[in-house]
Amino acid sequence: MAAYHVIDVAELEAEGPGGMVRRVRRALDAKAFGFNYFIFPPNQEGLEHDHGDSNMEEVYFVVKGSGTMRIDGDELELQPGRFVRVDPAATRVSVSGADGLEFVTFGAPLDGQYEPPSWG
């Protein structure tokens, strides 16, 4: 058995609301932290949420496109190459611009071991 896994985003099924989620963590069978790839079409608002219950800190990395992220009422510009770290209890939502938006999210709980969610 190989000591690694490889997957290309283009090989992953479009899932979640509007088919915007590519479940990379599940495809690679990673267990230490969560991560997924998101592809938003132009002018699309994501799901507003927080991770207060799981105490999961998240980091977003913008791959291409543009948009904004609203975090607890503040609005941040999203552009390729930008990282954004968000506290667990902060409410956040991503909104793509006219060119769409692609980003990767990474997350793990601040106070314990990561447990993959039942949905993937």
Image: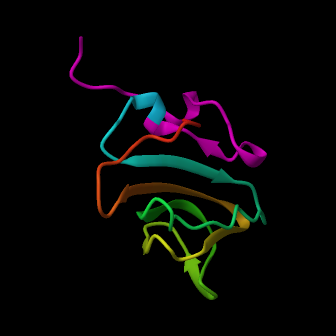
State yes or no: residue 28 in magenta. no
Judged from this view, the residue extending furthest toward the bottom is: 74
Percent of width and height locating residue 115: 39, 43
Percent of width and height locating residue 74: 60, 88
At 46% from the left and 59% from the top, the residue drawn is 54
Percent of width and height locating residue 73: 64, 88
Percent of width and height locating residue 52: 50, 68
* Dominant secondary structure of the residues highlighted in magenta in the image: loop
**Front-most of residues 88 and 47:** 88
Judged from this view, the residue extending furthest toward the top is: 1
| Image quadrant assignment for residue 4 | top left
**Front-most of residues 94 and 31:** 31
Q: Quadrant of the C terminus?
A: top right
Tell me if residue 51 comes above or below residue 9 in the rendering: below
Question: In the rendered structure, which segment of residues is drawn in magenta?
Answer: 1-25
**Front-most of residues 38 and 118:** 118
At 44% from the left and 48% from the top, the residue drawn is 35
Q: Quadrant of the N terminus?
A: top left
| Image quadrant assignment for residue 82 | bottom left
At 57% from the left and 67% from the top, the residue drawn is 50
Q: Is residue 104 left or right of residue 115?
A: right
Tell me if residue 93 comes above or below residue 115 in the rendering: below
